[in-house]
Image: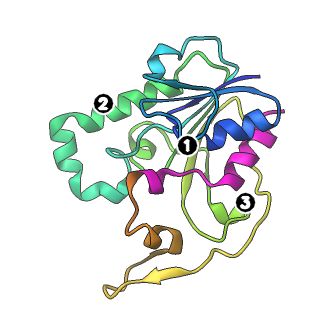
Amino acid sequence: MKILIACEYSGTVRDAFRALGHDAISCDLLPTEREGPHYQGSVLDVLNDGWDMMVAHPPCTHLAVSGAAHFAKKRASGVQDEALDFVRLLLNAPIAKIALENPISIISSRIRKPDQIVHPWQFGHETTKATCLWLKGLPLLVPTQIVSKGERQVYASGKSSPIWHAKTGGGSGKARSMTFQGIADAMAAQWGK
């Protein structure tokens, strides 16, 4: 299959599909972090190039509920509506099979609820990270290796976060947006049939 991995610079999902023999290319404004087929530029440049499938990871900066304290400013400036329009564009792309991935976000209330929410602990990684999937022409992901949900860092405020998130100091955008290998492998194995 010819597969576009939109808004991915890590190469993780791209390489999982390529390992199974698919013609997969990643696309992002940033350069790829791993050697492999990558288009550095806007996904709009390649969106209509006859893909069989697209797995899209649109930026969550203006969408994730973790930033809800800033939503009023984001609405007023228009950046939140721009981000939602980009999600709509990806979901409505002329591609038969689409998976759009994002954390818990306003996509659920402003566009539609996700088809599925998965966590890394369902795919062999001992941690939590709610990952929403909006699907078109694809089945739900089936967990491949259920393990412990992992330890959490508890802060003086009483709040806690998964250890992987705490180790990144609250996490840079890059660290927070990473796709865990077990989830990427499941996407390739189950959706690449």
Mark 2 or mark 3: which comes first in sequence?
Answer: 2
Q: Nearer the viewer, mark 2 or mark 1?
A: 1
Disc 2 and disc 3 in contact, CB within 8 angstroms = no
Which label number is shown at residue 152? none
Q: Tag 3: residue type?
A: Phe
SS of the residue under disc 2: helix
Q: Tag 1: residue type?
A: Ser
Residue at (43%, 36%) from the top-left corner? 111
Residue at (37%, 28%) from the top-left corner? 85
Disc 2 and disc 1 in contact, CB within 8 angstroms = no
User: Does residue 149 appear to the left or right of 32 in the view shown?
Assistant: right
Residue at (77%, 27%) from the top-left corner? 22
Quadrant into which the C terminus falls: top right
Which residue occupies the foreground of this view, 21 or 129? 21
Q: Nearer the viewer, mark 1 or mark 3?
A: 1
Disc 1 and disc 3 in contact, CB within 8 angstroms = no
> Distance of mark 2 from mark 3, alpha carbons?
33 Å
Which label number is shown at residue 10? 1
* 179 falls in the magenta region: yes
What residue sits right under mark 3 in the picture?
A: 123
Quadrant into which the N terminus falls: top right
SS of the residue under disc 1: loop
> Distance of mark 2 from mark 1, alpha carbons?
24 Å
* 123 falls in the magenta region: no
The percent position of residue 37, horizontal first and vertical second, equals 63, 26
What residue sits right under mark 2 in the picture?
A: 82
